[in-house]
Image (tube, rainbow, N blue to C red):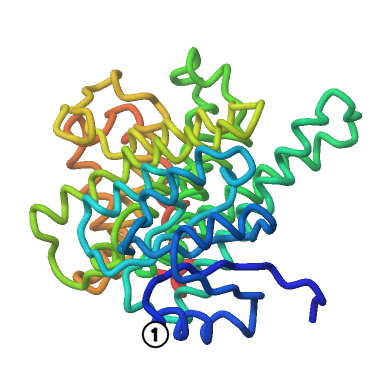
């Protein structure tokens, strides 16, 4: 076991919550419990933790007021904050995330889920700091370091995509499969020199890496919606649709810590436009035809195919043949007709990828 344990500050005015939270975490982390925002701010003058778990509803100074002060102070602005709260509404969650929180967990929480969320977030923060250090010293790096930077970028992308799948546990393997489908479709596109003007300036490796973040906005969607076994209400579906906007915002925040934005620009395009439709009825912006970036049009096909052939609590999996027919029927409606024709030509390869990953469907 490592002699160094990361430090977590748990802030809540309820002694019971402090006790339950401390019991859940103390085996894995050094935990300091604090019963007010004022006490937190005081101790931060001497000690900086690796992560703060912060209650929203506290007397004198609530969690939102506390995080504003943290983010406004250079010495505390980069401490990751997760809100723990009994407030179970979308507006409160969005407000917390917009103020700079990295996650929003509803109480009473599941200790294993809390531990997993913390583990993934701390890993993201660690890799982000490493990436910042690399970029700060970029001018001094030699050519041999380039491969390491690429691997580190991919590690950050992979970790964040795993965070999404940790939240949305009904779609296990979805991100890996869509990345593989996209590779097949992109190879076919390049082989036929279609949309050459757009693709000629792409870095294919970064495009495929960035595709892992197409659903990153789901980190801002409540667990009760992501994991709902039945049909979503209209209001719940509107919140699901907002993951495209949240995804774009998350990636913009990551860009603040990097100097090379190429792969993040690809990721932002994937996140923001993969639910747009060729005839204009998609979301979030109702783009039509070639107003939709090519990356979004490509992801739309692979994302829908995987959703169709995957079993969910609320539906059985479609067969490959049924999925192909649905996508072909969506030609010039949901999907770019040129890309649909390419998809049909390589649909057997899609079936092989789906079949080889049946254990994750």
Residue 77 occupies quadrant:
top right
Whether residue 344 is visible, yes or no, is no
Looking at this view, is 55 or 275 the one in front? Answer: 55
Image quadrant holding the C terminus, namely bottom left
Residue nearest the observer in this picture, 306 or 34: 34
Q: Is residue 100 left or right of residue 160?
A: left
- Measuring 32% from the left and 74% from the top, which residue is drawn there? 107
**Residue situated in front as seen by the camera: 26 or 305:** 26
Which of the 4 image quarters holds residue 83? Answer: bottom left
* Left or right of 31, for residue 179: left
Q: Is residue 18 above or below residue 64?
A: below
Name, please, the residue furthest toward the top: 197
Residue 268: percent from the left, percent from the top?
44, 33
Measured along the vertical axis of the image, is residue 245 above or below residue 318?
above
Residue 96 at x, y = what percent? 35, 50
* Residue 9 appears left or right of 16: right
Residue 109 percent location from the top left of the image: 37, 77
Residue shown at the point (20%, 49%) measured from the top left = 326
Left or right placement of residue 13 versus residue 31 in this view: left
> Residue at the left extreme?
234
Q: How many numbered circles does the render carry?
A: 1
The residue lying at 45 percent from left, 66 percent from top is 166
Question: Which residue is the site of mark 1?
Answer: 16
Residue 82 seen by the camera: yes
User: Residue at image x 45%, y 79%?
Assistant: 18
């Amino acid at each position: 076991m490592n002699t160094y344990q990361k430090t977590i500050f748990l802030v809540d005015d309820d002694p019971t919550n402090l006790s339950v939270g401390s019991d859940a975490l103390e085996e894995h982390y050094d935990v300091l419990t604090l019963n007010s925002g004022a006490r937190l701010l005081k101790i931060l003058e001497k000690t900086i933790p690796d992560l703060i778990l912060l209650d929203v509803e506290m007397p004198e100074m609530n969690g939102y007021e506390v995080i504003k002060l943290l983010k406004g102070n250079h010495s505390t602005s980069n401490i990751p904050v997760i809100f723990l709260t009994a407030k179970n509404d979308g507006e409160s969650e969005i407000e917390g995330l917009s103020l700079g929180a990295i996650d929003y967990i509803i109480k009473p929480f599941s200790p294993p889920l809390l531990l997993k969320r913390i583990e993934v977030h701390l890993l993201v923060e660690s890799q982000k700091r490493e990436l910042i250090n690399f970029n700060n010293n970029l001018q001094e790096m030699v050519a041999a370091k380039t491969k390491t930077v690429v691997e580190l970028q991919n590690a950050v992308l992979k970790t964040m995509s795993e965070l999404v799948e940790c939240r949305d546990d009904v779609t296990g393997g979805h991100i890996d499969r869509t990345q593989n489908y996209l590779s097949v479709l992109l190879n076919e596109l390049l082989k036929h020199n279609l949309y050459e003007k757009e693709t000629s300036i792409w870095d294919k490796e970064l495009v495929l890496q960035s595709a892992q973040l197409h659903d990153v906005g789901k980190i801002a969607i409540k667990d009760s919606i992501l994991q709902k076994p039945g049909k979503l209400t209209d209001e719940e579906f509107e919140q699901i649709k907002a993951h495209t906007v949240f995804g774009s915002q998350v990636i913009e925040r990551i860009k603040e810590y990097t100097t090379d934005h190429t792969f993040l620009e690809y990721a932002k395009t994937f996140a923001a436009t993969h639910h747009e439709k060729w005839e204009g009825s998609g979301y979030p912006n109702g783009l039509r035809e070639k107003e939709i970036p090519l990356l979004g049009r490509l992801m739309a096909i692979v994302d829908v195919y995987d959703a169709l052939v995957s079993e969910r609590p609320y539906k059985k999996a479609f067969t490959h043949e049924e999925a192909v027919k649905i996508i072909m029927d969506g030609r010039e409606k949901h999907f770019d007709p040129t890309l649909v024709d390419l998809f049909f030509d390589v649909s057997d390869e899609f079936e092989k990828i789906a079949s080889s990953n049946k254990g994750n469907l």
